[in-house]
Amino acid sequence: MKPVYLDNNATTRVDPVVVDTMVRFFTEDYGNASSMHSFGSSVGAALKQARASVQRLIGAEYDHELVFTSGGTEADNTALLSALETQGGRNEIVTTKVEHPAILSLCKHLEDTRGVKVHYVPVDSMGRLDIDAYRAALGPRTAIASVMWANNETGTLFPVDRLAELAHEAGALFHTDAVQAVGKIPIDLKSTEIDMLSLSGHKLHGPKGVGALYVRRGVRMRPLVRGGHQERGRRAGTENAPGVIGLGKAAELALQHFGDEQSRVRALRDPWSAASWSRSTARS
């Protein structure tokens, strides 16, 4: 019996086109992208193209606003820890009770080991954020507010555009864990006040072990991983070229198939729209 897989929020199948794109960077074009010779620089050019593809997917204004990471968890950790280091005189975090463990576990650790004050904003019975409680939690000691864009358990979308504006009114940075949103809903970061955003390749039919942190131009950042000069000195370590290039191809495919994601998948999710989608498909 063929299995029916219904857990794409946990991970997705890597698209065969993504696999084909990655293979030659394991077996043929395997140079170090940071090397000075042409065998490495050709890989560097492929990384640049992948960066541009992810940039387009999330509507970032500049390609250098992207820092490639090992995934969403590293991106989340980097965002919060960097904010605490760069926001002088501020040692509080505002987040929600329903964040991913990549945020909640780090916050608990910071409370226990560094004395960081964390405000956990509740949600209602429908999973919607208590905006008044969020506004009240922000203050002159808030370094960063971090609220997920789409909840991985309920699918609830949070009004991150407005939440970012409120954070800025309090003088704080704003980060969103958009791992469950990127590739599924339209995102245009240029039109928002979001300072940092996390994404992960394996949630949008890309490979595991690669993701990115968007850091708006002008936002100060402290690296989590130190060593070499990679990622403009913001994330050390030899670039995971096959993974990053796979993420770039997955971003391209997400843009190409965005209409299908919005129509076919919605019909599968919403019983009231499934019948109409089925009828329109039958007529075409």
Image (tube, rainbow, N blue to C red):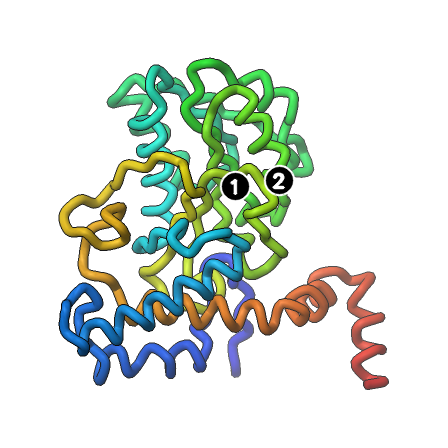
Sequence-first tag of 1 and 2: 1
Q: Could you tell me which residue is drawn at 34 percent across and 51 percent down?
A: 67
Q: Give the quarter of the image for residue 133.
A: top right
Q: Give the quarter of the image for residue 260.
A: bottom right
- Above or below, 278 relative to 143: below
Count every numbered label the image shows and give the total. 2
* Label ID, residue 148: 1
- Above or below, 88 relative to 257: above
Spot occupied by residue 34 in the image (x, y as percentages of width and height) = 18, 64
- Marks 1/2 in contact by CB < 8 Å: the verdict is yes
Mark 1 packing: few (<14 Cα in 10 Å), some, or many (20+)? many
Spot occupied by residue 10 in the image (x, y as percentages of width and height) = 46, 58
| Callout 1: SS | loop
Q: Could you tell me which residue is drawn at 49 percent across and 41 percent down?
A: 176
Q: Give the quarter of the image for residue 70.
A: bottom left
Mark 2 packing: few (<14 Cα in 10 Å), some, or many (20+)? some
User: Disc 2 designates what residue?
Assistant: 158
* Label ID, residue 282: none
